[in-house]
Amino acid sequence: MGDEHEVTWNDDHGRHHEDYVAHPHYTFSYGVEDHHTGDYHGQKEHRDGTEVFGEYTVKEPDGNIRIVKYQAGKDGFHAQVYNSHRKDHHNHDHR
């Protein structure tokens, strides 16, 4: 876990409030592979403070496997798109 700090204040009615601001930190992943329906997709992501890294995968109707790897943080959102059946590769940046 990262740093956390306590925030306290009194409202107009004299009630005392406490809240905690924590350094967000998590990792998750999931995947679906259904041979009956052909559904294939998944995602994994890791966050540490303001930085997020992850990727998601999806099987498209034509059989292409698309993988999107992404990063988001103080420099904006950046994604790289990979396709298994195509030779193209795309970078996408949003600030």
Image (spheres, grey):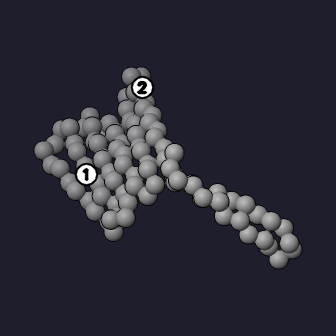
Crowdedness of circle 2 by 10 Å Cα count: few (<14), some, many (20+)?
few
Q: Residue at x 37, y 28 (%)?
A: 38
Residue 80 position in % (x across, y down): 25, 51
In the rendered structure, the answer to whether residue 94 lies left or right of residue 32 reads left
Give residue 21's quadrant in the image: bottom right
Task: Tell which residue pokes out farthest to the bottom in this image.
Answer: 12
Horizontal side, residue 77 vs residue 49: left or right:
left
Task: Give the mark toward the camera: 1 or 2.
Answer: 1
Using the image as rendered, state which of residue 4 and residue 74 is in the foreground.
Answer: 4
**On screen, 21 above or below 1?**
below
Q: Secondary structure at mark 1?
A: strand
**Residue at label 1?**
80
Q: Which residue is mark 2?
A: 34
What amino acid is found at the position of numbered circle 2 in the picture? Asp
In the figure, residue 50 lies in which quadrant?
bottom left
Q: Is residue 87 left or right of residue 47?
A: left
Q: Quadrant of the C terminus?
A: bottom left
As measured in the structure, the alpha-carbon distance from the residue carrying label 1 to the one carrying label 2 is 26 Å
Residue 11 vertical placement versus 26 (above, below): below
Q: Which percent across, then down, holds residue 47?
A: 44, 49
Please identify the residue farthest to the right as the structure is shown.
Answer: 13
Would residue 31 be visible to someone looking at this image? yes
Asked where in the image residue 9 lies, by quadrant, the reply is bottom right
Q: Mark 1 and mark 2 in contact? Answer it, CB < 8 Å.
A: no
Front-most of 85 and 22? 22
Type of the residue with mark 1: Gln
Q: Mark on residue 2?
A: none
Structural crowding at the residue carrying mark 1, measured as other residues with C-alpha within 10 Å and reported as few (<14), some (14–19) or many (≥20): some
The foreground one among 22 and 91 is: 22
